[in-house]
Image: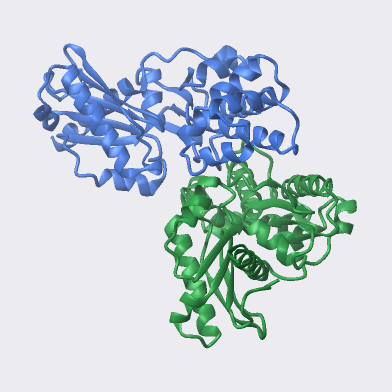
Chain colours: A green, B blue
Amino acid sequence: MGNGASQTQLYIGIDGGGTKCRATIYCPKQGVLGTGLGGPANPLHGFERTLESIMVSTQQALQDAGLSLQTVHTLVAGLGLAGVNLPNLYEQIGQWQHPFKKMYLTTDLHTACIGAHEGEDGAVIITGTGSCGFACVDNHSVSYGGHGFAQGDKGSGAWCGLEGLKAVLLDLDGLGPHTELTALFKLHFNTSSAMGIAEQMAGQPSSSYAKLARMVLGAADKGDPIAKAIVKEGALYISMMARRLLEIKPPRLSMIGGLAEPLQKWLSDDIAELITEPKQPPELGAVYFAQHSFAQEIEQVK
Amino acid sequence: MGNGASQTQLYIGIDGGGTKCRATIYCPKQGVLGTGLGGPANPLHGFERTLESIMVSTQQALQDAGLSLQTVHTLVAGLGLAGVNLPNLYEQIGQWQHPFKKMYLTTDLHTACIGAHEGEDGAVIITGTGSCGFACVDNHSVSYGGHGFAQGDKGSGAWCGLEGLKAVLLDLDGLGPHTELTALFKLHFNTSSAMGIAEQMAGQPSSSYAKLARMVLGAADKGDPIAKAIVKEGALYISMMARRLLEIKPPRLSMIGGLAEPLQKWLSDDIAELITEPKQPPELGAVYFAQHSFAQEIEQVK
């Protein structure tokens, strides 16, 4: 990778998801120069906010690398963003008057997969705020899920949190079975009324639901039947997604995201056994993607 | 009702829900003078929009009654609004610089119950865009549900639509069972891709999900197992809610809202048998509420 591009060209890889945005500045000769962290960067849940999070993480990475903020205009950027699997959002972000020398855009799934397998063929499942799966073999790729909260993203943090919340509200109304989650949620929201909890969650983005997942996973670990049923249903979906990804025979399968580790023990044994650690984080996948896309463009110009 | 208030005092009853807002101008001597219809009026999903819908329906009702728009300042208004079961929203609407002579605010559940039983004790279940239940016996009232989309409102139009959509997206990904809903949704959204459907529903309000419920109910009627399972689960919740409302022994139970009629045949037989037609619509309940509240205020001043 990087053939035809100068060895002094700097790259920035940006991985944007529902809760945070990570940026890494990379030099082909020296490796990682600096990293930065920004807020939510899923354009589906806020277009302006996404651009802001990208710029915050970029500026932090520049500072961390000891580079001037003006250097941004010399960077070749690779962006892997959640939400841009939706064609309209891909186009909107593509039309952004970005400050980089070049910007190459793809989904967070794609850059995660490139990172996890260092550019080689493989499959990834992301279970963070949302959930989705991606596999790439011999330049043929497939993807599943990633349809957004609340209609999709089963097995994700936001989904776990929403299902837990639904169970608690039913319990508080006496219209559903008792669950240990109720006591946990009462404490968390500092209210004992269903309406008090509902009010605090009204209009909240998926990232707020994802914050509730920790309690659901914790209660499942302690054996609460309702929490266990939620986590098992989510894990069953992720196992099924893994099987679909394996249909195109990727040589490796990795799981990424905040729920990857806690969900692993709930997966089907045959799937759990197959899962291997990602080799590199998604933001380095975004760097590889930028390098590769830039090199291709230079080749075409020649 | 209306003791102490002049027989020439005009009242306006306003019933605001997730999809529309109805207003009725009422004269104690002549009955209904005019009606009006506005857009969505659930402050949880848009505060300014709610006030606009209230004013649109009010102005239409004034015109329909052959009254000048200035007459608004002489009306005693009763407002039954979805969403104001949340204390913060109740307070916000209460602080509105409204144009009426007097404004009395309560939940759409309360005015629906007053209307359905002409001010007598009783219970109502509303299944429209959202779902909730309310019963009032000897000045003691209880309510269940109404926790908002997507965390609550089980058995509602928005819930049915969301569950149908989830099933279709799973089917299209090959991660869930086949359902006849998929063909219906493809036609409705004019796309055969899961992502194309997901994109059109991204960020949509609950009223957009409620519009999908018709397809789910239709497929359930035709025997599609997935659609039937959704409708049955929703109806089971509504039946359980009815049983909780019956605990305080309301003499009557009515169902109101767009899903009241189509859901009825899916309810438990013991509950379906008990359901009686509402005597008056919610906007007349709001008129009674205005009359009653105004009369009480006059009494207190004396």
**In what quadrant of the picture does the N terminus of chain B appear?**
top left
- At x 63%, y 53%, the residue is A130
Where residue A43 appears, as percent x and y from the top left, is: 50, 55
- B106, B50: nearer the viewer: B50
Q: Residue furthest front?
A: A302
The x and y percentages for residue B44 are: 40, 43
- Please say if A155 is above or below B22: below
Q: Is residue B198 positioned above or below B282 on the image?
A: below
Where is residue B138, by image quadrant? Answer: top left
In this orientation, which residue lies closer to the viewer: B185 or A185? B185
The answer to whether residue B156 of the structure is visible from this angle is no
Residue B283 to residue B89: above or below: above
Residue B179, position as x, y percentages in the image: 70, 26
Residue B225 location, quadrant: top right
Image quarter where the C terminus of chain B lies is top left
- In this rendering, does residue B254 appear at all? yes
| Front one among B96 and A29 | A29
